[in-house]
Amino acid sequence: IEAPLDHEAYGGDDIMRWFNPDYQPEARTRRSKAPAPTVSPRLVLLEQGDTLLRLVGRYMPDHEAVSFPDAEGAVAELSHSPARALVVNAPLVWPGSGLLDQVAKPPYGTPMITCWVPGTDEVARQLGVVRYLVKPITRDALLATVASLGEDVRTVLLVDDEQEALQLFGRMLSSAERGYRVLRAKNGQGALDMLRDRQPDVVLLDLVMPGLDGFQVLQEKSRDPAIRDIPVVVISSRDPAGEPIVCDMLTVTRAGGLPMRDLLACIGALSEILTPSVRSAGQARSETPAA
């Protein structure tokens, strides 16, 4: 003979839900103590180099970004893990170009933003130098750059107005197995004099110096046939990607087009961001008392 189930001994109403098919559980009245998951906005970047990746890491710390040098890798990443946008950093991207054709339809309708933010390689080309290194510079990066100029490089001219930088880079070069001979100049005029008198194999040049700066040194050097062909590596604390104006072109596309509501929302958001002076002027007028 089975004994009757002791209702209270087995937990009262809580246990009866397992035996009564008509049991209706009460709604939870207490909030969960589990922390809410934090999901960071995610961007997939398509670029040669790491210019945008560094900028996103510096100025958008709440975003997650991953960079790819080719369209195949970026599209594969989007297929595997969706993102808020695909950002393409490349000059002259237009419909019908090879690059845009490869990413014409990103997976999941991901919007694509195209822009052109020049990196250190582009700035080096514009300045007529072989490389553009941004301080702080590691020993490995410095030695690899100098070594890439060829086996014949033996004498290196360091040009920097900071004594600490001259000492640091001098120690790096002196520690190399090649045994570089290091010359030093603390200003632009001293650099030009040393170039003409000593004919170094390469110049490591700082751009920001009092008096004759690095830009003027490059101009004077380009006018003198005797020193014009000596290669220059810029070593500067000025990041070319951090200048106030880095991009004059921005395009937003999405496969399948944009519905009217999204189009107007984009126009409104972009116009507000790109015309801060108008907004500031409006606020100033509203805060100015009437005469």
Image (spheres, grey):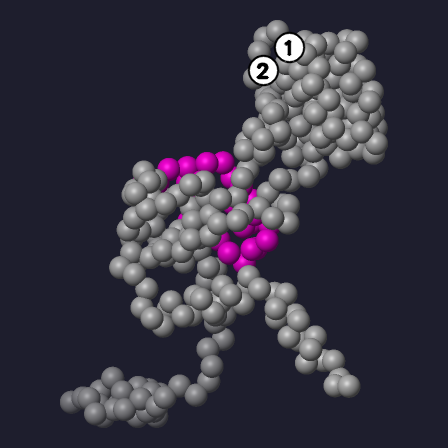
Residue neighbourhood size for the residue with mark 2, other residues' Cα within 10 Å, grouped as few (<14), some (14–19), many (≥20): few
Report which residue position mark 1 lands on: 153
- How far separated are the C-alphas under marks 2 and 1? 7 Å
Whether 169 is among the magenta residues is: no
Residue at position x 33%, y 87% from top? 14
Q: Helix, strand, or loop for circle 2?
A: loop
Q: Is residue 172 visible?
A: no
Percent x, y for residue 69?
41, 37
Position of residue 137 measured from the top left corner of the image (x, y, whole percent): 66, 31
**Residue wearing tag 2:** 149
- Numbered circles on residues, count: 2
At label 2, which amino acid type do we have?
Leu
Range of residues picked out in magenta: 44-73
Image: 87 above or below 167: below
* Residue drawn at point x = 66 percent, y = 75 percent: 283
Q: Is residue 2 left or right of residue 55?
A: left
User: Where's the C terminus, which quadrant?
Assistant: bottom right
Quadrant hosting residue 235? top right
Viewer-closest of 113 and 225: 225
